[in-house]
Image (spheres, rainbow, N blue to C red):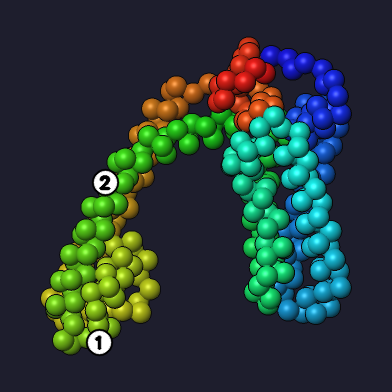
């Protein structure tokens, strides 16, 4: 599959921003990844009190310089694609927007430290799979997503069953422990204990003291091991089934309409939106 040669400045910029098969496209994407890494590290280091006091005159300007660059990049992406709304509502489009919004929120929420949310920019590093032509990983990610989608109905039923069980167990524990243990002061708090116990987290902030309450706790702990294995088995089964249908022979060519990738080498139309490639 070969894309046609860009005929104007808009198409040339699109090729640079969205394609990684050209020298300029790869240079742009690699530079972008380096800026993202620098940005995330700067936000992380800014939370270290000693470094923040010593290098605040570097962190603050650097944050805004990178934010302005990412804002310009986002606006350029909206300009060059055929359907800006489709890009804006796509996974990468939403991540790109969320990566710049926290800085601007600081104007409206003073002392809210919204800049620390900029670590969401780390999600943009997922583009590394496209940049370095790791088509196999793109194919595997599609298989994983397909397995999760196929599992959602079963997992939903499973979660409803677990929540129902937690509600019942929490109510029973409230009746058993409520009169003797102030930690079980209400059904919602007892349900919180049941969730912590059944997930085998075991914070230890709430614990039964009656014999019958401890007996129920022991049963719930044992049940927890089996319950945790259920969603894993559901997703694993769907993953095996989806993997038999997968095809790793895909390209990194991006659709100019929806910006989606992962097309077959002989594809003429986008398999996501139908646009001609």
Q: Position of residue 130 (x, y in %)?
A: 69, 33
* Of residues 146 and 90, the one drawn nearer to the viewer in this rendering: 90
Q: Secondary structure at mark 1?
A: loop
The residue carrying mark 1 is: 182
Estimate the spatial distance between the alpha carbons at disc 2 and disc 1, rounded to whole Å.
Answer: 33 Å
Report whether residue 33 is seen.
yes
Q: Position of residue 263 (x, y in %)?
A: 61, 22
Q: Nearer the viewer, mark 2 or mark 1?
A: 2
**Looking at the image, do the residues carrying marks 2 and 1 touch, with CB atoms under 8 Å apart?**
no
Q: Quadrant of residue 238?
A: top left
State which quarter of the image contains the N terminus: top right
Q: How many marks?
A: 2
Q: Nearer the viewer, residue 78 or 69?
A: 78
Find residue 55 and report its horizontal and vertical position in percent: 84, 73
Q: Earlier in the sequence, mark 2 or mark 1?
A: 2
Q: Residue at x 68, y 70 (%)?
A: 108
Q: Residue at x 19, y 77 (%)?
A: 174
For disc 2, the marked residue is 157
Query: Dot 1 surroundings within 10 Å: few (below 14), some, or many (20 or more)?
Result: few
Q: Is residue 199 left or right of residue 123?
A: left
Say which of 100 and 161 sits in front. 100
């Amino acid at each position: 599959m070969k894309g046609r040669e860009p005929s104007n400045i808009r198409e040339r910029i699109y090729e640079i921003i969205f394609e990684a098969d050209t020298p300029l496209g790869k240079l742009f994407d690699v530079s972008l990844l380096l800026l993202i890494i620098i940005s995330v590290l700067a936000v992380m280091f800014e939370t270290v009190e000693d470094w923040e006091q010593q290098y605040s005159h570097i962190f603050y300007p650097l944050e805004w310089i990178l934010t302005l660059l990412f804002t310009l990049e986002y606006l350029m992406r909206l300009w060059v694609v055929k359907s800006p709304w489709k890009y804006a509502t796509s996974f990468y489009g939403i991540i790109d927007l969320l990566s710049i919004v926290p800085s601007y929120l600081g104007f409206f929420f003073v002392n809210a430290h919204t800049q620390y949310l900029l670590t969401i920019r780390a999600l943009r590093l997922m583009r590394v799979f496209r940049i370095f032509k790791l088509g196999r990983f793109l194919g595997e990610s599609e298989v994983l997503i397909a397995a999760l989608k196929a599992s959602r109905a079963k997992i939903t039923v499973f979660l409803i069953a677990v929540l129902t069980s937690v509600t019942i167990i929490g109510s029973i524990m409230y009746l058993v422990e409520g009169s003797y243990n102030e930690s079980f002061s209400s059904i919602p708090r007892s349900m919180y204990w049941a969730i912590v116990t059944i997930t085998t987290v075991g914070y230890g902030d709430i614990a039964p003291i009656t014999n019958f309450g401890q007996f129920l706790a022991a049963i719930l702990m044992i049940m927890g091991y089996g319950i945790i294995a259920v969603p894993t088995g559901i997703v694993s089964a769907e993953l095996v089934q989806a993997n038999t249908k997968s095809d790793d022979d895909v390209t990194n060519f991006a659709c100019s309409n929806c910006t989606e990738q992962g097309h077959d080498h002989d594809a003429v139309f986008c398999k996501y939106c139908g646009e001609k490639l």
